[in-house]
Image (cartoon, grey):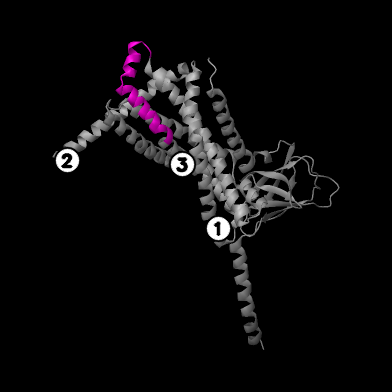
Amino acid sequence: MMLVARLGQAVRLSLTDLGSAARLFVSLMGRLPRSLMRFGLVRDQVYYLGNRSLSIIGVSGLFVGFVLCLQGYYTLQRYGSAEAVGLLVALSLVRELGPVVTALLFAGRAGTSLTAEIGLMKAGEQLAAMEMMAVDPLTRVLAPRFWGGLIAMPLLAAVFSAVGIIGGWVVAVPLIGIDAGSFWSQMQGGVDVWADVGNGVVKSFVFGITVTFVALFQGYTCKPTPEGVSQATTRTVVVSSLAVLGLDFMLTALMFSI
Amino acid sequence: MQASRFDVWVGMFVLIGGAALLFLALKAGNLLSLNFDQTFQVTAKFDNIGGLKAGAAVKSAGVVIGRVESINFDDKSFQAKVLLKLQTNTAFPKDSSAKILTAGLLGEQYIGLEAGADEKNLVAGDVIHRTQSAIVLENLIGQFLFNRAADAGAPAEAEAKP
């Protein structure tokens, strides 16, 4: 009986969480246009979330490109089609790894800082103080950060994929000695601008919304104590990583199966 | 809106992101091959198109002169109706022939166009009559096995005759 009761409690609590997340999402959506009026706030958030993540994204993209190229070459040369390694690197980066790995890194690099910042604001009762001064914390604090994540994430994913392709080229052409012409022509023959690159961009948009919103929600609803903030930061990484991977499966099934 | 020292950096970030997207579209996706040259459409009917896909290249002498626009099934002649878009600056005689060829051993398939000898040139809406289907590996193997069997059977028959 205890087990059943605990299960019931878990379901009820997660439903409550889901409901309050949905309500926060809707009220945040309503405030998004108005928060653009103060674009300076959004710009600062793009700087903190985007520019500051650029180095980790660039370096990770480069190494993912290196490794993909080496591993792809290992498999492809068995079938005598080592030239197709360019296509393999480009397709796997643009369609899958670019958006997903960027979202995971973004959750670790930017999502945690968002959660911790908002959680500490809440713990220090800054959010309550804002409300006292008739300043809406959703418009003033959450919405610019949401815009920042929304703008930064697709750009970061594009940088990741582009740097990864360059990394693949570095390994394939000068290191392994694959012909540069067939490397690019195989890639250009197989990558479609709308079906592959465009859908990758759509994915990165969705992941940007997911990661940023999870981070904001965890910060906004955390317990206003040091432990609460630390738990919320951990939950941000766990929940947004799982959400990104789950959504990725659904988006891939929707986009590429048709 | 206040100017800030972040303006430059955020601008650079957006520019880098835009450049990366442009790189993906142009260098990896080859958006430029969607050339905006004037084209005209002709159709060609094939008995079997093998693995030909819409968007495949139409080449003559190895040079890309057009793209496959669409592939449909014609239920009157039970053939594949392939719509080709050729560049208007290429003129081909009316009796040109189209073949489905494969780039490399396992490469993608494309259409090879060979010029005929007719005085008149293909115009929009024309049909290319001389076509050669894709080579289907199973048919090829089947033919080979059939020939082997026929060869093996022939001496036996010759012995049985006298």
Q: Which residue matches tag 3?
A: A101
Q: Residues within 10 Å of mark 2 (few under 14, many from 20)?
A: few
In the image, are marks 2 and 1 on the same chain? yes
Position of A169 with respect to A97 (left or right) is right
Distance from disc 2 to disc 3, alpha carbons, whole Å, reads 38 Å
Furthest residue in direction left, as rendered: A1
Image quadrant for the C terminus of chain B? bottom right
- Amino acid on which the number 3 mark rests in the picture: Val
Residue A140, image x, y percentages: 41, 18
Quarter location, residue A195? top right
Picture coordinates of residue B98, whole percent (x, y): 72, 52
Kind of element beneath mark 3: helix
Q: Which residues are magenta?
A: A109-135
Q: Kindly identify which residue carries mark 2.
A: A3
Label 3 to label 1: alpha-carbon separation? 24 Å
* Residue located at (34% from left, 29% from top): A218
Whether label 2 touches label 3, CB < 8 Å: no
Residue at mark 1: A76
User: Label 1 marks which chain's residue?
Assistant: A
Return the chain for callout 3: A
